[in-house]
Amino acid sequence: MTRRLTMAQAVIRFLKVQHVSRDGSESPFFAGCFGIFGHGNVAGIGQALQQSSDFPYYLCRNEQAMVHTAAGFAKMSNRLRALVCTTSIGPGATNMVTGAAGATINRIPVLLLPGDIFARRNVAPVLQQLELASTQDVSVNDCFKPVSRYWDRIERPEQILTSLPEAMRVLTSPAETGAVTLALPQDVQAEAFDYPEEFFQRRSWTVSRPRADAALLNQAVGWIRAAQRPLIIAGGGVIYSNATEALAGFAARTGIPVAETQAGKGTLNFDHAQSVGAIGVTGTSVANRLARNADLILSFGTRYSDFTTASKTAFQNPDLRFINVNVAEFDAFKHAALPLVSDARTTLEELSGALASYRVSEDYRSEISRLRSEWAPEVDRIYSRRHGPPFSQGEVIGVLNAALGPRDVIVCAAGSLPGDLHKLWRTRDPKGYHLEYGYSCMGYEIAGGLGVKMADPSREVYVLVGDGSYLMMAQEIVTSLQENITLNIILFDNSGFSSIGGLSRACGSGGFGTRYQYRNQGKVSAVIPVDFVANAASLGAHAVRARTHEELTEALAGLKKQTRTSVVVVETDYYDSVPGYESWWDVPIAEVSESESVQKARKAHVEGRKRERYFWPPQR
């Protein structure tokens, strides 16, 4: 039997019956569609969504933001649920490219359905069409190719019969997931075809737990037993695999310390005896000291960004070996590691059985305990500062950490806040720390927070955002009000791009071009006063300003009484920052400059690069 439907109607009908299962639990994969309609999708996908009342449609304010919302939703759902995003052809489509890049870099499933130019071409050039003299086979949607895990252009209605299953394969793959883009020409969206009924049968896609090669696993066990100073690096794969309890048990039994990446923060509670906190450029003194002398790195679910490895300077032991546990073969082989291409939880369970009698030495345990006991007072010191007004950023984090409940979620993405949070935030729940730091995209925060709250409405969501990011993309406050989704937004007002300002000063450039100041013929001029309270209120939010610790504490308590999105504006010191802890980041400095400060920074950079390492396969 067949059913005559437009291509767009068939797409929505197919998406509604896709499910995902893992460990015997099954749920619908798609939770609805975000979009903005234009001439390129209003009569196709728009019409199909209108007649599908059981597939929710959400109107957003910015196309980039809708992808961030979808990414936040999928990440909070451990990649077992996803949202669809649709736009018209033209600027609506290209606005999504930034969001697509973020989703792909972070390995988060989002399905993008941008409208496209006419497949039949006879009326070209149509509104918003890119024309090239060399070909008629390119549109602006080709920009999605390098930032999508799967890309296709549907030029005939029957092509979705093969394309949509491929899209689902990628979206539900723990190794290959990311942005999937299906460009839909606006004329083809509205064309009808007799689709087989079998295409719309309920289907469940199993998210498997692959096991490591037995021989390589045995070799890994031998390496761990031989190690004197092993260190675990926990990445986001631990959380996505629901492996946090397995990791906590493994670390407690073996005594191996656990350091965390940004995506992996929260894998252990901060007070676990083997938790040594953040590693790398934004790491703690504990993790970075242990990393420097480690003779074995056992990683789970990390892609080893330069922030994690401190630009390949974090590990200095000449006899260091790596064991990488990762579902993605590409990541498992990094750093000439012994690759265990496998699921984190499954491999932790197998390692636990094989290493039942293994313990690190008492000397190493004592060193870990001592370093942890030295770090805790440093966090307390930063939390308890009375720097302001304006506040130091670290003390605001301290007030928030004390006020929030164990299941509350903080959301952040860009600027200096992620680094300070990575070092200082005391996690008490694997899903309580939500950072987008693979792309570190300004503007993610409020949109991503919306997705987090949609994924788990039972949790309070606190969006931490700097004034720079807020000014880029605050409009999704309106979307939160539209959908009756309550967010708590803490806006850090430091009158500029504080993170890059600090980096600029470290590079010898004095913070050039990073402050919000009036132009005054090259002279230092007054900071532009932006009334963020009035701005947030104009968008419909409850908005207050907190100038003191007491006011901030009172404002946070008051948020619990609000039934709509709230914004608390806190002025922070543009120049004050949390220290770095025995780490380094490779940011190239001008080799030739007339500035003495740049020359000085260049010399320090050259010295820092001397510690960068290549990692070669060890003698096995």
Image (tube, rainbow, N blue to C red):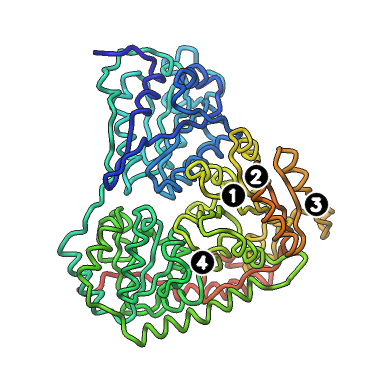
- CA separation in Å, label 1 and label 3: 20 Å
Residue 160 occupies which quadrant of the picture?
top left
- CA separation in Å, label 1 and label 4: 21 Å
Residue labelled with disc 1: 442
Three-letter amino acid code at the position of disc 1:
Met
Badge 1 crowding class, 10 Å Cα cut-off, few under 14, some 14 to 19, many 20 or more, is some
* Labelled disc at residue 472: 2
Three-letter amino acid code at the position of disc 2:
Met
Residue labelled with disc 4: 586
Q: Is residue 223 shown to the viewer in this render?
A: yes
Give whichever of discs 1 and 3 has the lower sequence position: 1
Give whichever of discs 1 and 4 has the lower sequence position: 1
Q: Nearer the viewer, residue 296 or 142?
A: 296
- CA separation in Å, label 3 and label 2: 16 Å
Name the quarter where the N terminus is drawn. Answer: top left
Q: What is the x, y in percent for residue 280?
A: 47, 69
Q: What is the x, y in percent for residue 390?
A: 76, 64
Q: What is the x, y in percent for residue 113?
A: 45, 29
| Residue that lies at the very extreme toward the front in this rendered image | 561
Q: Is residue 399 above or below residue 456?
A: below
Classify mark 2: helix, strand or loop. Answer: helix
Badge 3 crowding class, 10 Å Cα cut-off, few under 14, some 14 to 19, many 20 or more, is few
Residue 109 occupies which quadrant of the picture?
top left
